[in-house]
């Protein structure tokens, strides 16, 4: 486990990002919404260490503020986004419904979503 809002300790972790070609940030930008500057630092550090040609995939809630934040963060980190955001908005298939979870949602007092309204976009380190 690493705290992505504290990059000061990353140096102790060795070549953490240098040996990967694909980095996926799935619902991370909106999760760390009140730490934009620190998240920027995280992305910039990843970009510095990542191999040329590696890909960064962002998956996020379909809201203008997350699209804008990813655009800004990518520009600052010199990550080239390869397209406009790709929107995806649909429901889980019929064999992946809440009922499959039995009593779990009731026990943890939480109802998982069976639909999503999201976007994805891929960037590359040139
Ligand atoms: C909405 S969840 C998305 C989880 C997963 N990526 C997915 O797509 O299902 C956001 C994730 O960000 C992680 N997270 C939030 N703040 C973090 C931080 N400071 N350092 C590392 N991870 C963090 C949470 O633990 C959680 O797993």
Image (cartoon, helix red, strand yellow):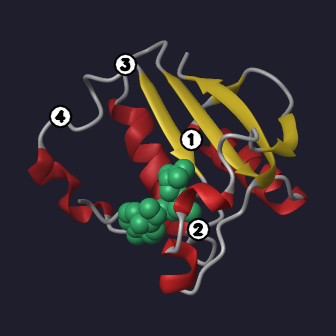
Q: Is residue 115 left or right of residue 54?
A: right
Tell me if the residue at label 2 has its CB under 8 Å from ligand 1. Answer: yes
Viewer-nearest of labels 2 and 1? Answer: 2
Mark 4 Cα-neighbour bin, 10 Å: few <14, some 14–19, many ≥20: few
Q: CA distance from mark 3 to mark 1?
A: 14 Å
Helix, strand or loop under label 2: loop
Q: CA distance from mark 3 to mark 4?
A: 11 Å
Q: Give the residue displayed 79% in from the left and 48% down from the top.
A: 118
Expressed as whole percent of the image width and height from the top left, the position of residue 105 reads 56, 75
Viewer-nearest of labels 3 and 1? Answer: 3
Dots 3, 1 in contact, CB < 8 A? no
Q: Quadrant of the N terminus?
A: bottom left
Q: On the image, numbered disc 4 is attached to which residue?
A: 15
Q: Earlier in the sequence, mark 1 or mark 4?
A: 4
Q: Earlier in the sequence, mark 3 or mark 1?
A: 3
Nearer-the-camera pick, 99 or 77: 99
Asked which quadrant contains residue 14, the reply is top left
Please give the label number shown on residue 51: 3
Q: Quadrant of the C terminus?
A: top right
Q: Is residue 52 visible?
A: yes
Q: Is residue 5 left or right of residue 94?
A: left
Q: On the image, numbered disc 1 is attached to which residue?
A: 77
Viewer-nearest of labels 2 and 3? Answer: 2
Q: Give the residue displayed 40% in from the left and 19% down from the top.
A: 21
Q: Give the residue displayed 61% in from the left and 78% down from the top.
A: 34
Helix, strand or loop under label 3: loop
Please give the label number shown on residue 31: 2
Expressed as whole percent of the image width and height from the top left, the position of residue 51 reads 37, 19
Expressed as whole percent of the image width and height from the top left, the position of residue 38 reads 48, 66
Helix, strand or loop under label 1: helix
């Amino acid at each position: 486990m690493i705290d992505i809002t504290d990059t000061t300790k990353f140096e102790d972790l060795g070549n953490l990002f240098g040996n990967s070609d694909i980095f996926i940030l799935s619902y991370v930008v909106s999760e760390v919404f009140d730490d934009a500057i620190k998240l920027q630092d995280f992305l910039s550090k990843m970009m510095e260490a990542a191999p040329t040609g590696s890909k960064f995939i962002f998956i996020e809630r379909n809201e203008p503020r997350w699209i804008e934040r990813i655009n800004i963060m990518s520009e600052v980190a010199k990550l080239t986004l390869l397209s406009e955001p790709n929107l995806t908005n649909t429901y889980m298939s019929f064999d992946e419904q809440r009922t499959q979870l039995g009593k779990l949602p009731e026990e943890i007092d939480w109802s998982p979503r069976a639909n999503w309204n999201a976007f994805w976009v891929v960037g590359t380190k040139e």
